[in-house]
Amino acid sequence: MNPNPQAPPGPVSHLRPAGPQTLGILADLIAQEQPVFAMPSWFVTAESAQAGHLLSEFVRELGDRPAGTRYRSFFANSRYEALHGAVKLLRHRAAATAAVHRGRVLVLDPDGTLARRADPLAEGPDLALAPGLLTHTTVDGLRSALQGTGTPVCGLVVRAPELLDDSARAAVAELARTARATGARIVVDLSDIAPDSPADPAVTALRPDLVVLGESLTGHEVPFGAFTGTHDTFEPWTTPQTGFLHSNTYGGNTVAMRAVIARLLPRWDAAAPVHRVLAAAAADRQATLDLYARHVNPMAARMQRKLHGALNVVRAKGSRLTVRLDSGRELDLVDGLCGAGLGVAGHNPADALTDVVRGHDPARGHVRELEEVLARETGLPHTFPAVSGASAVESAITLARLARPRQRRIVVFKHNYGGKTLVSLLATAADRTRAPFGPLYDDIRYIDPFTPHAVDEFREEAAGGDIGLVWIELVHGSSDAYTAIPGPLLDTVTEGRAQHGYLVGVDEVLTSYYRCGTRFAHHGRLPYIDLMSLSKALSYGCFPTGAALVSDEVQEAARRTNPLLVEELRTHHAHGLGAHFALQAIGQVDALGLPERVGALSDLVRAGLAAMDDGPRGVVGRRFAEGMLGRFEPRVPGVLGRFVDPEGEWMTYALILWWINRARAFVVYDVFLLPLTATEREIRQVMRSARRLSRTGPVRLLAHAALFRLGQRLSGRPKRRTPRTPTPAYSRNNA
């Protein structure tokens, strides 16, 4: 089987060697101890607000729209992540309308790249890995699909309009008008557009609701993508319930934001209004939040305002963060989140500057070296570079489908988290997270691993012989699971692997390199695996990177099925600087003594959580610990529970404010992701605070939050401050 539509001459990376500007951005951030990744979704920086404003102005000018027209953006790590996000938004936007379109999206895909990724086995849009994308390589095919068959669609995506001649552009513009008349939204993919491009006639004629942007806006040197569109189009993601439904761990990271600003800002002269707007955001936190609300995510800005600076991270070094409250007061905290588990040496490690940034040689084969190192580390000899955990999971699932083309079924255990792209979403076993974005791949079975009959349920599923992949996250950090997947179930998976011929893949994005006590979480639990995804540890807390790893058998079987796609997956996200950071991270695991250090610190975490009081009046219920990862269940006991949701806004804010203001620990979810290089004193501080929290009733917790917020209000809005570092978030010279 070799389902290859029309394709370019050969796959190439979308990323180029890092140049002086990118290395300079990293050097500044690390030396000045500025946060690169502090937390997913809620991380609001002056740079991300500024980048959102510049993207808004860029898209406005490309479409020749009137001054004052405002757009919102969602930041991703590649053009593909941005395309998937745009499709999700189209589907969510159309979900409340007549369902005759069934989430189908029509796509003009001139080079066939999206088609290969969405439908790697050429099974058609109903059976594809990312179903519902009706892709066509020609305008005639697009016209036939839209007019000839009358197939209702909720969106039309036009990829790479720069590849079309004038007559084709005119024809596409007419088809866009036809689609819009039926209620469809229009997306234009401009991933390769130059930052200094003038108004584009294709964009002007199409009047897109969303524009997909890509790596060209970072000079192809930093992983980046975005989808930018009208506020009306983004309306489904503008409520407290939906504002974070789509998310991205690395999205909005400071490296990419500064790179985008540096490439875009020169298109405007010094007298242009954008400079005043950016300078205001650099000087004043409230101006940053105003700009972020207008151009990125109003729900994140709303949360930041309600917390009065408790999430305003202004410094990050090793195992500690500094936040600046609205009053101007600064709090030094133990980092209890680690950017959602990023890095093996904490924030801005000194060797990241001396050994990676200043010693980086773009001509050196870091990508090849990383493959060799990971082969020794994991026993899986083939590395497929990624730019995030989601892209690593997506590549692994795609390769598994190619390697087992006749065994369509995928088994995922409930509580698993895999990512938010249309493919990695399959490994995210939360119904609410998937529901608005269908159609999704339907030959997938979610089994609850914690029920008494889980083993029997899995054996019955495997007996049918249809399973091609069993995908497992051994320890869950983003769900309501309070233990690792039980050993008897994992033993059953291992027993069935040889008998039924399915592949076993493990998601180690969060759990690798001693996050859960062992080098990899599957060690001692699964003796044989065929695929693995990695990301967070490889980033070294500095740069978006990841990898999907596969066995010889998987690569060869996948290559026989679709050699072009396999080569694309090997090359499109290959990046020397990302690989260099990953090599440094792996090298420091043993140099820092993490095996012994984490062993000792894990005992403190386990004992601390065990000592938490789960009495009838406390706000803590179930909890568990694996290595440096811990989780606890917030609850509101008694009569108050009828009025206060333990996972709702009030309790979320109360818990965050208690941890940051009282415990001096940056714990912002119901999970501990503690620094692997923390001191014993720091871990004891967090665990003592955990015990105090467990003995605090919900009334006292809510009262503390109310008093804190009142005190911040009474302190008044802070005066404008000069940024604390020599390099401000906005500088025309740096740009």
Image (cartoon, grey):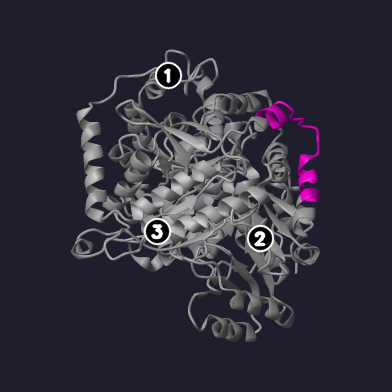
> Between residues 581 and 168, which one lies in front from this camera angle?
581
Residue identifier under label 1: 275
* Residue under the image location 31 percent in, 47 percent down: 653
Q: CA distance from mark 1 to mark 3?
A: 51 Å
Q: Is residue 371 magenta?
A: yes
Position of 628 compared to 610: left or right?
right
Q: Residues within 10 Å of mark 1 (few under 14, many from 20)?
A: some
In the image, what residue type sits under mark 1? His
Q: Position of residue 359 (x, y in %)?
A: 74, 28
Predominant secondary structure in magenta? helix
Give the residue furthest to the top. 271
In the image, what residue type sits under mark 2? Ala
The quarter of the rendered structure image containing the C terminus is top right
Q: Residues within 10 Å of mark 2 (few under 14, many from 20)?
A: many
Residue 572 visible at all: yes
Q: Give the mark, 3 or 2, whose residue is nearer the N terminus.
A: 2
Which of discs 3 and 2 lies nearer the camera? The answer is 3
> Between residues 148 and 450, which one lies in front from this camera angle?
450
Q: Quick check: marks 3 and 2 in contact, CB under 8 Å?
A: no
**725 vs 188: above or below:** above
Residue 18 visible at all: no
Residue identifier under label 3: 612
The local secondary structure at tag 2 comes to helix
Residue identifier under label 2: 396
The local secondary structure at tag 1 comes to helix
The boundaries of the magenta stretch are: 353-373
In the image, what residue type sits under mark 3? Met
* Residue under the image location 28 percent in, 66 percent down: 616
* Residue under the image location 43 percent in, 29 percent down: 46
Q: CA distance from mark 3 to mark 2?
A: 39 Å
Q: CA distance from mark 2 to mark 1?
A: 43 Å
